[in-house]
Amino acid sequence: MICWAQLLLFCLLALAGAAPAPAQSIPDLDAAKRDPALSVKPGSGASFHDCPDCPEMVVVPTGSFMMGSPADEQGRTDSEGPQRKVTFAKAFAVGKFEVTFAEWDACVAAGGCTGNKSPSDAGWGKGRRPVINVSWDDAKEYVAWLSRRTGKTYRLLSEAEWEYAARGVTSASTPSKRYWWGDQVSHEYANFGNSGGQTKGRDQWKSTAPVGQFPANLFGLHDMHGNVWEWVEDCWHRFYQGAPTDGSAWVTSCTESGRRGLRGGARHYHPDDLRSATRGAVIAGDRSYSFGIRVGRALGP
């Protein structure tokens, strides 16, 4: 039993300046709420949403790769060279899927997409199918609306970002392959087929496929090859001489006024047009049932 004298001694010692318990740091539990991307490890394939009707996003890690194709790649064109090393010093976010009709319709309903309120689905269906018949100008209106809606910086991907994301590699020493899964095209991994489309293996669709029906690549991204061509930010350059090496969009010294880049091929295109290095470009205002959108987002300040 503690006597009164001992209790008094304890009290006197406390009053004499016993050291207080060290302050504990309080975790910022709201950080992920302010920016959901903070809860996602780059390259893990995990995803986040900035809002209920926003595209699902994946964080792509830092790294380097060889952009373009080697001279002996099957299907290569001169526009895919010369190859160069591109390095990404900062991670960035990429749409896990192509933008869907449902996501586009949310923009229209909110008054954000006014230039193309009702793009045709070509009779194939809407919902989770990729939005089609959208121009580069329409795509820019969509990412501007996402930026206003979320307070984050949404944009179209640069050509370099798109190819890096499609390949799913983080080292420039990794040998170039035609597709993220290898050098042989396969209906198990993509929706494609020249002469109007084909249905083989996992590929059940001559039309566009609902997003996410094929396996994700090593970054966790679906449908980077086939289904629909995806607009990118860059204006058209016939070759890569003078192209940026930091992954940024190349929007100066354009070789053909008004043309913007497209990547990835589409559901009715030849396998060579689905390759990671394949480049396309048309006038920014053009619309087609082959053209769709995949969005990017900056991370951090």
Image (cartoon, grey):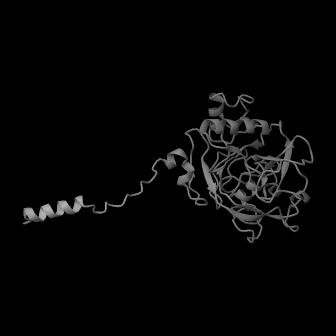
Residue at 58% over, 38% down:
53
The answer to whether residue 63 is seen in the rendering is yes
- Nearer to us in this view, 102 or 22: 22
Is 277 left or right of 257, judged from the image as shown? Answer: left
Determine the image quadrant of residue 123: top right
Task: Find residue 84 and report its horizontal and vertical position in percent.
Answer: 83, 64
- Work out whether residue 9 or residue 194 is closer to the camera in this orientation and state it: 9
In this rendering, is residue 78 above or below 122?
below
- Residue 293 in which image quadrant: top right
User: At 76% across and 37% down in the image, what residue appears?
Assistant: 134
Query: Where residue 276 appears, x then y in whole percent?
Result: 77, 58
In-front residue for pair 85/289: 85
In percent of width and height, residue 199 lies at 71, 51
Mark count: 0
| Residue 170: x %, y % from top left | 69, 65
Q: Does residue 126 appear anywhere in the picture? A: no
Quadrant of the frame with the N terminus: bottom left
Residue positioned 69% across, 39% down in the render: 143
